[in-house]
């Protein structure tokens, strides 16, 4: 393992890659940007580094340490002490990786980044990524304080959920939003956030449930109806989606109205076989 540190440097990053050029490139760029950087070329070296300090980010090459795909990340998170450390997985645009790795791992902490970037683009991406992490941690602290001071309010759990989304932890975000709903069954913001996070995670059935509750609370909101229609359509409920989108036309602003007309026309064309 090779270490580089600057006096008063920014966050600590560990770069893990088998190939020397990948380690060299990331170390050079990130040290130049003011980060404290360690590089590891073997998994035992990474474990040793993690025993000494808890980094703010691990940059993990796709094939690092002989572990295919995301298995190296699974090995890292098998240690409870390392849970919550975000990982940026590097892949080439042409690579595919084994998604039999537990889905919750992809939902927790791991982000995928193609390796076709310049040094400046890498620095910008890492700066933005870690800024979001800091903001998420700060929001989590404020949300926890709000929950402790007003445990019967849904607002604290909404903020907590947003903080977990910023920290790339979808399961905890969903749990927080569900807690907000448990406190206030008519919390429209919670249903909206649940619908969006389930949609982005591909759980369209759960998105339908959330958007249905949102439409119950806000039946004349065209955006809610549109989103419910998309979730229904993704589940193969095309006739129900058409009905919902048609209903949304009544309340839509001109821009949304036009986009819905295009969606309905395309649906009609597909049905007629054109």
Image (cartoon, rainbow, N blue to C red):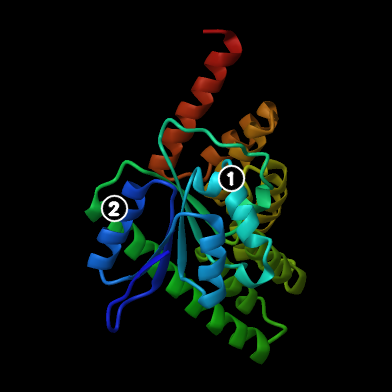
Q: Quadrant of the N terminus?
A: bottom left
Coordinates of residue 119 in the picture (x, y in percent): 24, 53
Specify which label sits upstream in the sequence, 1 or 2: 2
Residue at x 22%, y 55% (from the top left corner):
120
Q: Report which quarter residue 116 is drawn in.
A: top left
Q: Secondary structure at mark 2?
A: helix
- In the visual, does 210 lie left or right of 141? right
- In the visual, does 1 lie left or right of 221? left
What label sits on residue 109 in the rendered view?
none
Coordinates of residue 231 in the picture (x, y in percent): 63, 39
Within-10-Å neighbours for mark 2: few <14, some 14–19, many 20+:
few
- Between 37 and 220, the one lying in front of the other is 37
Q: Is residue 171 above or below residue 35?
A: above
Q: Is residue 223 visible?
A: yes
Q: Is residue 72 above or below residue 130?
A: above
- Between 46 and 161, the one lying in front of the other is 46
Residue at x 60%, y 86% (from the top left corner):
146
Coordinates of residue 262 in the picture (x, y in percent): 45, 27
Q: Residue tagged by mark 2?
A: 25
Residue at x 35%, y 49% (from the top left corner):
20
Q: Residue tagged by mark 1?
A: 67
Q: Is residue 218 above or below residue 184?
A: above
Coordinates of residue 159 in the picture (x, y in percent): 56, 74
Q: Report which quarter residue 97 is drawn in.
A: top right
- Between 252 and 108, the one lying in front of the other is 108
Count of residue discs: 2
Q: Is residue 194 visible?
A: no
- Between 140 and 256, the one lying in front of the other is 140
Q: CA distance from mark 1 to mark 2?
A: 22 Å
Q: Secondary structure at mark 1?
A: loop
Residue at x 68%, y 69% (from the top left corner):
80
């Amino acid at each position: 393992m090779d270490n580089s540190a600057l006096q008063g440097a920014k966050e600590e990053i560990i770069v893990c890659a088998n190939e020397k050029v990948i380690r060299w490139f990331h170390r050079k760029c990130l040290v130049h940007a003011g980060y404290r950087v360690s590089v590891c070329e073997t998994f035992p070296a990474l474990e040793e580094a993690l025993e000494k300090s808890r980094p703010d980010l691990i940059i993990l090459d796709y094939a690092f340490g002989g572990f295919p795909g995301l298995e190296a990340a699974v090995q890292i998170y098998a240690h409870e002490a390392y849970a919550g450390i975000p990982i940026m997985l590097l892949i080439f645009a042409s690579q595919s990786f084994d998604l039999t790795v537990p889905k919750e791992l992809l939902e927790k902490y791991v982000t995928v980044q193609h390796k076709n970037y310049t040094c400046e683009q890498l620095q910008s991406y890492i700066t933005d990524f870690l800024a979001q992490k800091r903001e998420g941690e700060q929001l989590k602290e404020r949300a926890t304080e709000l929950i402790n001071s007003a445990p019967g309010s849904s607002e604290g759990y909404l903020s907590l959920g947003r903080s977990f989304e910023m920290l790339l932890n979808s399961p905890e975000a969903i749990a927080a939003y569900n807690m907000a709903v448990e406190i206030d069954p008519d919390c429209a913001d919670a249903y909206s956030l649940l619908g969006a996070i389930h949609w982005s995670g591909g759980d369209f059935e759960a998105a339908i449930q959330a958007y249905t509750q949102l439409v119950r609370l806000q039946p004349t909101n065209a955006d809610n109806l549109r989103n419910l229609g998309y979730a229904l359509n993704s589940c193969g409920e095309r006739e129900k989606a058409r009905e919902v989108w048609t209903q949304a036309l009544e309340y839509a602003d001109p821009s949304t109205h036009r986009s819905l007309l295009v969606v309905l026309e395309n649906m009609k064309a597909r049905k007629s076989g054109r």
